[in-house]
């Protein structure tokens, strides 16, 4: 019978047999899968595991620092790479969603590769691939094709002559969480909503600029903190805020304003392939809307997305 304990015990043994004294490299994303894979490998081979965590400048507000701290407190040997400026520079003037995705994916690989190549004697590349990823990569297109291409690391295995190790390959998400809990991976990492690889880059509709990232991070933080404070966060599969390429007229005191609009999105789902919008309480929405408009300079209108998938997707780009 499968239990987290038996899985951990047998996997740790297999990893030790396989990896022996070699060095292993792993890309951390802040998400559940890569974090649990890291902790499992760390248990098996200790500091032979080296992790790289890239800040694309497109994560939630303060998330890079706080997740990096969590990783350090887990005892992981992690290199944090701050590369936000590169991503912003390369995204300047680009409005097409697929082009944005390609640039972000390409930059990610470049930054990761450059960092990896500074390391010596690495023999293995570990990935947090889980069973649904294995299935999806066999199935046709759809968003999943893009999802998988994002955090995989291009031609690195060939360039550095690395062998791949994927310790979570046979697990479903709930099993990954149970294993993570058993390994004492922090609860805020295990319970985290899914977050797209290209990050806020695809939640800023149209061109991405530093100012828009700042505005969206502020609004997103108010929404997500609100969900947590109201006990709603765990009832929602994924939530976030979209910054729309729309300005509208408002009033502030005696002044007319002409500012940005954001859309709140919260969905229930099991796998992201279909999704329903969440019937969040009106009082909660009212408070979030007020807080965003009062506290985030540059936003004067908030709307709630009441579209299900299909036909709408979860992300707007
Ligand atoms: P959509 O918008 O297609 O999203 O309904 C389904 C799920 O996938 C995530 N998503 C992405 N994840 N790279 C990723 O790593 C991407 O390009 C990407 N696009 C969408 C989205 O957040 C949702 O969980």
Image: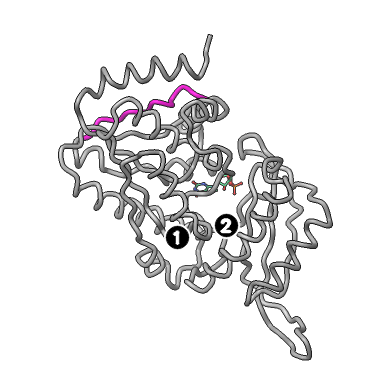
* Quadrant that contains the C terminus: bottom right
Is 253 inside the magenta-drawn segment?
Answer: no
Label total for image: 2
Magenta-highlighted residues: 162-171
Q: Which mark is residue 99?
A: 1
Whether label 2 touches label 1, CB < 8 Å: no
Local secondary structure at mark 1: helix
Q: Is residue 310 visible?
A: no
- Looking at the picture, how far across and down is residue 247, in whole percent? 67, 77
Query: Which residue corresponds to the image point at 54% horizontal and 30% vertical from the top-left?
Result: 177
Q: Position of residue 281 (x, y in %)?
A: 82, 51
Is 245 left, or right, of 6 in this rendering?
right
Q: Is residue 193 above or below residue 302?
A: above
- Numbered badge on residue 250: none
| Front residue of this view, candidates 316 and 226 | 226
Q: Residue at x 61, y 60 (%)?
A: 220
Crowd rating for badge 1 (residues with CA inside 10 Å; few <14, some 14–19, many 20+): few
Q: Position of residue 290 (x, y in %)?
A: 76, 68
Return the disc, 2 or 1, that comes first in the chain's sequence: 1
Residue assigned mark 2 = 317
> Dot 2 lies on which element?
loop
Q: Nearer the viewer, residue 216 or 288?
A: 288
């Amino acid at each position: 019978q499968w239990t987290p304990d038996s899985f951990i015990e047998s996997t740790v043994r297999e990893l030790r047999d396989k990896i022996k004294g070699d060095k292993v490299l792993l890309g951390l994303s802040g998400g559940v899968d890569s974090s649990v894979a890291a902790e499992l490998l760390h248990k098996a081979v200790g500091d032979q595991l080296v992790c790289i965590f890239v800040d694309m400048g497109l994560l939630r507000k303060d998330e890079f620092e706080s997740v990096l701290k969590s990783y350090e407190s887990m005892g992981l040997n992690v290199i944090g790479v701050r590369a936000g400026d590169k991503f912003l520079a390369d995204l300047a003037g680009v409005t097409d969603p697929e082009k944005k995705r390609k640039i972000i994916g390409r930059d990610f690989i470049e930054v990761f590769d450059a960092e990896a190549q500074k390391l010596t004697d690495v023999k293995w590349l570990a990935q947090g691939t889980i069973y649904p990823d294995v299935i999806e990569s066999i199935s046709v297109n759809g968003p999943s094709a893009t999802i998988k291409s994002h955090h995989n690391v291009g031609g690195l295995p060939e360039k550095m002559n690395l062998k791949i190790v994927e310790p979570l390959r046979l697990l479903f998400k709930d099993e990954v969480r149970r294993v993570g809990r058993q390994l004492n991976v922090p609860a805020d990492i295990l319970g985290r909503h899914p977050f797209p690889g290209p990050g806020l880059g695809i939640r800023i509709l149209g061109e991405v600029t530093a100012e828009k990232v700042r505005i969206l991070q502020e609004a997103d933080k108010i929404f997500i903190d609100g969900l947590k404070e109201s006990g709603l966060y765990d009832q929602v599969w994924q939530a976030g805020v979209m910054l729309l390429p729309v300005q509208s007229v408002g009033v502030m005191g005696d002044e007319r304003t002409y500012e940005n609009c954001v859309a709140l999105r919260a969905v229930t789902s099991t796998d992201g392939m279909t999704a329903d919008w969440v019937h969040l309480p009106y009082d909660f929405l009212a408070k979030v809307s007020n807080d965003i408009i009062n506290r985030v300079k540059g936003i004067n209108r908030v709307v709630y997305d009441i579209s299900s998938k299909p036909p709408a997707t979860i992300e707007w780009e």
